């Protein structure tokens, strides 16, 4: 059953490029819930935990899987509090699960709608790596007949910036691919920085593709606004103090964790809240300090 | 919500007159404009025939959005429409006594997880709605009336003996704040004149009359004097949703100089000045307004007029990181807390009016 969860999860990610890892994880768990034959809450909980552990061991970005699955477990707990018997509970879980997933699926559109007005005519935007939310926001702005240009970093090692650039070009948005090391060079001509996030931590900082932190520092130094676009299911309950403090499984893919980590490159870095101007989420436009508020409301 | 094709046809005469009066400068100070707006919205409810909350809200919305579009620089006008809409929503919820009476209208992670749907169409008829809404609005008007006093009450907590306070331009709320503090303590005030629009000298005269040691300086002396100042206390035109200010021009200069010298900047802002709008771009024309530039260079200076351009912008944008504290009628708040106040004041569906 657990192995199956891993397979379903990987299959979703392979077949549907437009689905983020967090959503895929929740879909997998909902699928798991449908087939599940547990008799008690505890049994279900244990099985879910096992399935989650399997998904976290696959070679996909773990951060958003961690946040989304934690949210899902919270969803299960809150639903079980509302209903007395386990059978009723399961029915309402499946029913509410659909609503839950629908809301999450809508979130990217919502972010794009709130963020697009910040792209004004004639502006230049710098972005890092490939983010589906940023892409959709830019498409939304282009649809509203805004003329703007985008600079995209190659973002080594996976060069996801190339993909981003190709997608922007397909949407007829003028864009330029730049070297990661040219970040500082380009920034002075740019009006704002827009990046996505793999996770938003409790302090209001973000975990994102390695290089985001450098970009944020440069933007702060040159006094350019640094906007983060992200869905709220990526809010994760950790509080990293510095880069070293970030959990290892977030920084390295599962297959690399066994190797000598001092020789490996981290996949993500942590950008502290002081460098972030605003976060655009499906809950509205938030300042970094609003993030902890949201998490406290949910988990307290 | 319903959007009428041509709102002007539907808008009442009194609203049209109000807009032209404001444009001609017949009202002094934002409080007066705000008060009048509430009055107008209230008369709308008194005179109107409504079968349910939905109708009432759409009328308020039509008129509110007309005011907001006609007077884009008076953010408090739009705020009042949002506030009245929120009052109607609240009274409707109380009247219905439904399960969602204490429900938080904000989108939150918790709501997503519990998958509740907050879809409320406000269509059920409630006979007492009009009365209760009017009661609630009267309460709100009281809050408006006392807001300046409430801010001034806090003066003693912020101004201490023998301090040197810097302020700029004229602001009623700053004036009463300083007066209140002067009743108990001795301190000195420096007023930046903020020409040609600020009229700082008028504030200085009025402060001097109430026996406060006052000095007027020109805008060019702001940086020079800042190292000696203990505190900057200013008013503002609007507080943006991120905690930034739309304030009298040269506020940014003062705030930057204060930051450089590590002097705290306190902004006196009654709650009606909080707006859920963001500044999208720093060089946006819609943000600022320009007035006749005769104060910069007099019209009588014919010989040079043809050769130069003159501008007189009214506002400055001050980014939130330059503000230390907001003092509102409910107490002191950090700029990062503004989003929370906004979520208490307005319903998220009314942000776009």
Image (cartoon, coloured by chain):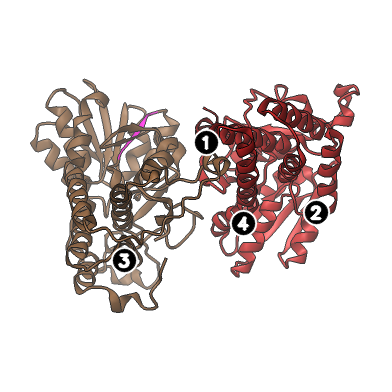
Chain colours: A red, B brown
Q: Does the magenta stretch include residue A216?
A: no
Mark 2 lies on residue? A16
Mark 4 and mark 2 lie on one chain; the one further toward the N terminus is 2
> Label 4's element?
helix
How far is mark 3 from mark 4, CA to CA? 30 Å
Observer-side mark, 4 or 2, equals 2
Instruction: Please give left or right for residue A284 compared with residue A176 in the image.
Output: left
Q: Does residue B148 sit above or below A17 in this rendering?
A: above
Residue at image coords 34%, 63%: B54
Observer-side mark, 2 or 3, equals 3
Residue B132 in the image, given as x and y percentages of width and height: 21, 51
Circles 4 and 2 in contact, beta carbons < 8 Å: no
Mark 4 lies on residue? A109
Residue A162 in the image, given as x and y percentages of width and height: 82, 53
The quadrant in which residue B306 appears is bottom left
Q: Which of B306 and B185 is in front in this view?
A: B185
The residue stretch that appears in magenta: B263-268
Mark 3 lies on residue? B55
Residue B71 in the image, given as x and y percentages of width and height: 31, 64
> Label 1's element?
helix
Circles 1 and 3 in contact, beta carbons < 8 Å: no
Residue at image coords 19%, 25%: B187
> Label 2's element?
loop
Are the numbered discs 2 and 1 placed on the same chain, yes or no? yes
Q: Which of A42 and A23 is in front in this view?
A: A42
Is disc 2 surrounded by few (<14), some (14 to 19) or many (20+) residues within 10 Å? Answer: few
Observer-side mark, 3 or 4, equals 3
């Amino acid at each position: 059953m657990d192995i199956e969860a891993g397979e379903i999860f990987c299959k979703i990610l392979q077949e549907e490029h437009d689905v983020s890892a967090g959503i895929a994880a929740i879909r997998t768990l909902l699928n798991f819930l449908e087939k599940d034959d547990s008799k008690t809450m505890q049994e279900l909980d244990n099985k879910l935990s096992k399935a989650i552990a399997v998904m976290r061991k696959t070679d996909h970005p773990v951060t958003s899987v961690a946040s989304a699955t934690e949210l899902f477990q919270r969803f299960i707990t809150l639903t079980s509090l509302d209903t007395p018997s386990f059978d009723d509970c399961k029915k309402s879980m499946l029913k509410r699960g659909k609503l839950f997933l629908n809301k999450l699926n809508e979130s990217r559109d919502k972010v794009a709608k709130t963020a697009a007005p910040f792209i004004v005519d004639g502006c230049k935007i710098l972005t890092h790596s490939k983010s589906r939310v940023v892409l959709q926001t830019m498409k939304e702005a282009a649809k509203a007949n805004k003329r703007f240009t985008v600079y995209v970093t190659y973002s080594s090692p996976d060069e996801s910036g190339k993909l981003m650039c190709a997608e922007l070009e397909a949407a007829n948005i003028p864009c330029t691919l730049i070297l990661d090391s040219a970040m500082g060079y380009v920034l002075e001509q740019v009006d704002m920085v827009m990046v996505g996030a793999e996770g938003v931590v409790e302090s209001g900082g973000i975990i994102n593709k390695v290089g985001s932190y450098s970009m944020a520092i440069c933007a702060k130094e040159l006094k350019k606004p640094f906007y983060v676009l992200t869905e709220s299911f990526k809010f994760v309950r950790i509080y990293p103090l510095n880069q070293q403090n970030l959990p290892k499984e977030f920084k390295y893919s599962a297959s690399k964790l066994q190797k000598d980590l001092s020789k490996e490159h981290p996949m993500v870095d942590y950008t502290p809240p002081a460098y972030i101007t605003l976060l655009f989420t499906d809950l509205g436009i938030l300042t970094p300090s609003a993030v902890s508020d949201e998490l406290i409301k949910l988990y307290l | 919500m319903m959007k009428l094709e041509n709102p002007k046809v539907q808008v009442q005469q009194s609203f049209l007159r109000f807009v032209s009066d404001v444009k001609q400068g017949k009202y002094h100070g934002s409080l007066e404009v705000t008060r009048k707006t509430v009055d107008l919205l209230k008369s709308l409810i008194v005179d109107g025939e409504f079968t349910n909350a939905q109708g009432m809200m759409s009328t308020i919305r039509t008129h509110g959005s007309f005011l907001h579009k006609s007077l884009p620089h008076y953010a408090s006008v739009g705020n009042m429409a949002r506030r009245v809409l929120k009052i109607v929503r609240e009274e409707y919820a109380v009247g219905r006594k439904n399960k969602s009476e204490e429900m938080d209208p904000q989108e939150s992670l918790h709501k997503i997880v519990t998958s509740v749907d907050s879809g409320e169409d406000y269509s059920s008829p409630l006979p007492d709605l009009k009365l209760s809404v009017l009661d609630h609005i009267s309460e709100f008007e009281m809050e408006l009336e006392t807001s300046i006093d409430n801010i001034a009450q806090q003066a003693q907590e912020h101004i201490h003996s023998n301090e040197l306070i810097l302020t700029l331009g004229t602001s009623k709320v700053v004036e009463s704040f300083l007066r209140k503090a002067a009743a108990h303590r001795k301190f000195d005030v420096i007023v930046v004149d903020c020409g040609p629009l600020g009229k700082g000298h008028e504030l200085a005269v009025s402060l001097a009359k109430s026996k406060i040691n006052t000095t007027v300086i020109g805008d060019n002396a702001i940086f020079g004097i800042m190292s000696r100042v203990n505190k900057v206390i200013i008013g503002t035109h609007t507080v943006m949703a991120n905690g930034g200010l739309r304030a009298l021009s040269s506020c940014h200069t003062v705030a930057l100089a204060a930051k450089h010298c590590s002097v705290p900047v306190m902004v006196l802002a009654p709650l009606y000045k909080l707006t859920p709008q963001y500044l999208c771009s720093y060089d946006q024309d819609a943000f600022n307004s320009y007035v006749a530039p005769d104060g910069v260079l007099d019209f009588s200076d014919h010989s040079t007029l043809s050769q130069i351009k003159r501008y007189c912008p009214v506002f400055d944008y001050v980014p939130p990181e330059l503000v230390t504290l907001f003092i509102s009628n409910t107490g002191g708040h950090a700029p990062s807390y503004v989003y929370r106040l906004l979520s208490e004041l307005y319903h998220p569906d009314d942000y776009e009016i």
